[in-house]
């Protein structure tokens, strides 16, 4: 899965590198059902997104593993979260609750007795 940094995320990163702001940490992951078109094809990501198209669930990230050129974020959706939904988009929000990374993908059906585990790498 390719996840794209949004224009707002790039702007914050640039300002932080310039010393103008302190970069807010990535704090939340959100899952949605609006990442595909009527033909069930993933909608291209532009970087202009400021929200998920159809956000269904947001949670605080609890596990991350920073490495020299990547940071891996882990997220688990237990059986009670989004049962019988078709997840097709996800986004990362920072501490200021602004969307800083976004992805669309083929629908992933989640049965009501199923757990999902996501491992997403941010590559620098």
Image: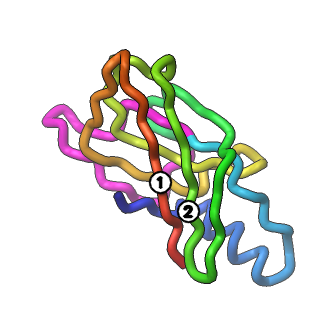
**Mark 2 surroundings within 10 Å by alpha-carbon count, few (fewer than 14), some (14 through 19), many (20 or more):** some
Q: Callout 1: helix, strand or loop?
A: strand
Q: Where is residue 43 drawn, in percent x and y? A: 29, 47
Q: How many discs appear?
A: 2
- Horizontally, residue 14 falls left or right of residue 116, namely right
Q: Where is residue 23 drawn, in percent x and y? A: 78, 66
Asked if labels 1 and 2 touch by Cβ distance under 8 angstroms, the answer is: yes
| Residue placed most toward the observer, 113 or 96 | 113
Q: Image quarter for residue 113? A: top left
- Horizontally, residue 102 falls left or right of residue 16, namely left
Whether 55 is drawn above or below 20: the answer is: above
User: Residue sitting at 78 percent across and 59 percent down?
Assistant: 24
Magenta-drawn stretch, dominant element (helix, strand or loop)? loop
Q: Where is residue 28 drawn, in percent x and y? A: 65, 44
Label 1: which residue? 119
Residue 46 belongs to magenta span: yes
User: Residue sitting at 71 percent across and 67 percent down?
Assistant: 12
Q: Which residues are magenta?
A: 30-50
Whether 19 is drawn above or below 28: the answer is: below
Label 2: which residue? 72
Give the distance between the C-alpha atoms of the residues marked 2 and 1, in whole angstroms.
7 Å
Residue 104 belongs to magenta span: no
């Amino acid at each position: 899965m390719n996840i794209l940094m949004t224009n707002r995320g790039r702007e914050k990163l640039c300002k932080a590198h310039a010393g103008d702001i302190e970069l807010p940490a990535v704090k939340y992951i959100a899952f949605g059902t609006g990442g595909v078109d009527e033909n069930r094809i993933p909608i291209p990501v532009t970087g202009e997104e400021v929200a998920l198209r159809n956000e269904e669930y947001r949670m605080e990230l609890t596990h991350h593993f920073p490495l020299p050129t990547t940071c891996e974020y882990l997220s688990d959706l237990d059986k009670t979260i989004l049962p019988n939904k078709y997840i097709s988009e996800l986004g990362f929000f920072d501490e200021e609750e602004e969307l800083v990374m976004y992805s669309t993908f083929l629908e992933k059906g989640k049965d009501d007795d199923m757990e999902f585990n996501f491992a997403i790498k941010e590559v620098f």
